[in-house]
Image (cartoon, rainbow, N blue to C red):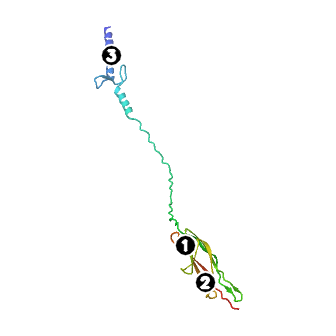
Amino acid sequence: MRNRTAMLVLAGAVVFASSIGAVAGCLSLGDDGGLGGGGIGAGSTPSPSADAGLGTLEATVSPSPATTYETPRNTETTRTTTTTTTRPPQDTGARIVWFRITQEPQCPQGTTEYPVEGVPVVVEWKVTGADKVTISVDGPGIYGTYPTEGSETFTFSCGGAADGETVKHTYLLKTVGGGSTKSKQLTATATAHEITEV
């Protein structure tokens, strides 16, 4: 009976010692001298340093803002070309609007019995900005002085020209007054004819 009791006590002591060893293996001494749980067991407290470190890392590392790329738009540039036309200053003085022949001349023809008279030359003119005009015939000498607008009839001489010869006479118009003198020359022509004596 005593031997049985002693064996039971010894078996209990072995079991108790084994339990103590198991508990000691699960516990470890921390850096601050306290016991830290090597595993999860009754009365063990999770290590706050691991959780705190993860929290700090999450707080420090923030997601990078998304980079936005803007696609350049095709823009058309309109170039405006400005052309500057420089006009010469207009002359406010005398101006010859026209000086022209309105009737072509003809030389006399026919026979002495049936003569055909020649046709005179007629010129006309219009001038602005002047006081009057002068006309010269076949040279610089002034034939006459006229108003700034009008016409004149001139006898067209064909004397001394051979039969079929072209006869020419010139008529020069000049402005008088109104600044610088303006001039224009006309040339009238006709064909000479021999007058046959009958």
Residue at image point 36% right, 28% down: 52
Residue density around tag 3, few if under 14, some if 14–19, many if 20 or more, within 10 Å: few
- Badge 3 element: helix
x and y, in percent, of residue 106 in the image: 65, 82
Q: Nearer the viewer, residue 170 or 140?
A: 140
**The residue tagged with tag 1: helix, strand or loop?**
strand
Along the line of sight, the residue nearer the viewer: 189 or 96:
96
For marks 1 and 2, give the one nearer the viewer. 1
Query: Helix, strand, or loop for circle 2?
Result: strand
User: What's under tag 2, amino acid-wise?
Assistant: Val
Hey, what amino acid is under mark 3? Phe
Can you tell which quarter of the image residue 27 is in? Answer: top left
Measured Cα–Cα span from mark 1 to mark 2: 27 Å
Q: Is residue 56 visible?
A: yes
The answer to whether the residues at label 3 and label 1 have Cβ atoms under 8 Å apart is no
Q: Residue furthest top?
A: 1
Measured along the vertical axis of the image, is residue 146 above or below residue 85? Answer: below
Q: State which quadrant residue 107 falls in.
A: bottom right
Image position of 175 (left or right of 4): right
Residue underneath mark 3: 16
Q: Pointer 1: what residue?
A: 175
Asked if disc 1 and disc 2 are in contact, CB closer than 8 Å, the reply is no
What residue sits 36% from the left and 31% below the top? 56
Q: Nearer the viewer, residue 135 or 162?
A: 135
Q: Position of residue 153 (x, y in %)?
A: 63, 77
The image shows residue 192, relative to residue 70, as above or below, that is below
Q: Closer to the N terminus: mark 2 or mark 3? A: 3
Q: Inspect the image, locate mark 1, and give the three-letter code of the amino acid beneath it.
A: Thr
Tag 2 residue: 167
